[in-house]
Image: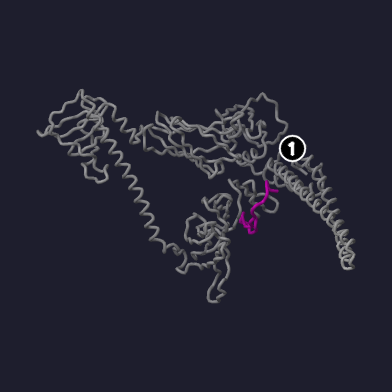
Amino acid sequence: VTGDNVHSLCLLDFSNNGQNELVVGSEDFDIRVFQEDEIIAEMTETDVRLVILSVPCAHCLVHSLAMVWLMGTLGVYNRSSRNWRIKSKNRAVAIHGYDLDNDGVPELITGWSNGKVDARNDRSGEVIFKANFNHGIAGIVEADYSVDSHTSGNHLLCVSVEGEVRGYSPATGGPGSDLLDSNIEQDTIRELSQRKQNLVLELKNYAENSKLAMLGASFAIDGSKSGQSIASSGSVPFQGLRGLQPDGSASGFDTSGGSGGDGPSLGGPGGQMGLMNRSGLAGHSLGGLSQSGGVQNYTLGLGKTDLNKSSMGVIPANTQLQTTLSVNPGNQTVQPHVELFISTTNDTIIRAVIIFAEGIFDGESHVVHPNGQTLGSSLKVPIIPPKDIPVDLHIKSLIGQRSSSQFHVFELTRQLPRFSLYTQISNDLPDPKGCVHFNPNERPQRMVMWVNQNFLLQDDIVSDGDLKVTFMSLRTQKTLRLRMSLAGDIIQSLAQFLNIDDLLTVADFPDELENLRQILVKVDDLHRVRTKLTAEMADHSNLIRGMVVRAEDARIMGDMKSMRKGYIELYDLNRDLIAGYNIRCNNHQELVACLKQVNQIIQKAGRVRVGKFKTQVINSCRTAIKTNNTSSLFKIIQTGLA
């Protein structure tokens, strides 16, 4: 039993016991590994898998699982852990395992919708070979294309949608041959061009900072009259900042401090700039050599430095980025969501935020770029996780001053708890109708630790005795009360946290059982209608055969009146047959939908048990359905025992 429609299947020795297991990918984004009827492993992803392929692993006895997702993603699993994953704007249409570099281990060959074919190392995902077709790839196969007895092994054949076929043989340079040697010059040129572009951009930023600093110094000299003395008009002019201008023709960059103060100073033969003036006031001082050789100090206007720093993107050294996650229950206009609150520790502003997360945003990324009126030191981002799975939020924020043209990038990672769309409510509400009873043989403190890790709480729960906490699911508006009484994903997560291999529970969900009873009654009615429609269609088919023979006989005998009458009756009967077929199709769709609901209920009954008891419940439920034993089915779902 799977949770949804099956999209992909694969056989491989997952448990390394010498026998193949069945790997199933379904529309509910889950990957399940079946050993006969038992589910021995489950992995949750963020999209539907279109293809699952077994690839021998380079460094382990177990085969790797190569997977293609619906939205242009390719990845490899080693048992239940993911080795790597890449995402592309193009769609992977074919994958195959083939030893292209002749090292004894097959590489993952992928054909893409844009005509690209690449070979990747199954362990790291590194590209070791690539080629391009003029049209999209239709398929990749392995065969002895040349049928040459002098060559050993098969060729890799790639076919495009326009019929172009290319064949590739393994490398002849020995195991581990570099297949990208022919492109090393192009790659080197491309890498150097990228480095040049980055350096030119960095130099441009330095030059702009230098201009801003010079402009601020000029304004300061002109505007600060009081407290200043110019001893000689023949002083050597301030010549700029060496290393901060593109041509580098100015004087050196002195970081030793100058006569103007005890901070970093900028200067050379033309002068030096300190952070404090002679009197100790905040500001800059500019020193130069007079004609007589004496050192003269010129105060650069009070407060102008902050403006210059602001323009150059300078922020306080103690600036930090803080994040908070909370549950927002929503209202009539805003749906429930998790609220990510991002703030800085001072007056700096957040210019933009980029969040990377799997399975939450379209394209797995989300950008928030507030307009000028809403700029501030804090920002709120709504997040709506589609499923109850833990997700890592990779956050990048641009931080600077309001007048900054350049910003600092702050990066951090926060984990969204598994049950983040549950909000804590009062324990005074009545108990839910459905419940699960079990004994995990664990201390309540361990349960408290699990609750604090898997739910978003304002304050951590502390329990010195019995535990009772109530949540409401913001997706379904249903109540969840924990008194060691959990269901479905909750039980699986708790069993994993507590390292419980097998767990038998007693489940009582009257609403679910009543829903199952109504579905089974509807299934019986649909089966009866289906049988009746099938019999009617068979009768109509026999009548049609007789009518056709009689109408053709009348035509041969020249009895046009009888022929016309026969074909009119045949037309009416055929119209009834088509109408009956449409009814049968609708009946079949309803029947499939009902059977899917029955399977989902069986899956829920299995998920409130762990280990061998989970498999036992699913198998017993299937047996009860085959024998049409409804009372036994309900007993199995409640007690877990046949």
Residue 307 relative to residue 570: left or right? left
Residue 186 x/y as whole percent: 39, 59
Looking at this view, name the residue that lies furthest to the left: 292
Q: Is residue 401 above or below residue 619?
A: above
**Dot 1: element:** helix
Q: What secondary structure do most residues of the magenta stretch adopt?
A: loop
Q: Is residue 547 visible?
A: yes
Give 38 or 265, whichever is nearer the viewer.
Answer: 265
Q: Is residue 98 above or below residue 309?
A: below
Residue 263 x/y as whole percent: 26, 32
How many numbered circles does the render carry? 1
Residue 564 x/y as whole percent: 86, 60
Disc 1 crowd rating (10 Å Cα; few below 14, some 14-19, many 20+) is few
Which range is magenta?
1-21
Picture quadrant of residue 22: bottom right
Give 588 or 582, whichever is nearer the viewer.
Answer: 582
Q: Which residue is mark 1?
A: 512
Residue 233 relative to residue 326: left or right? left
Does residue 17 show up magenta in the picture?
yes
Classify the position of the C terminus by image quarter: top right
Give 627 or 502, whichever is nearer the viewer.
Answer: 627
Q: How is the image coloured?
A: one colour
- Amino acid type, residue under disc 1 in the picture: Glu
Residue 377 relative to residue 469: left or right? left
Q: Is residue 620 visible?
A: no
Does residue 54 show up magenta in the picture?
no
Residue 365 x/y as whole percent: 51, 42
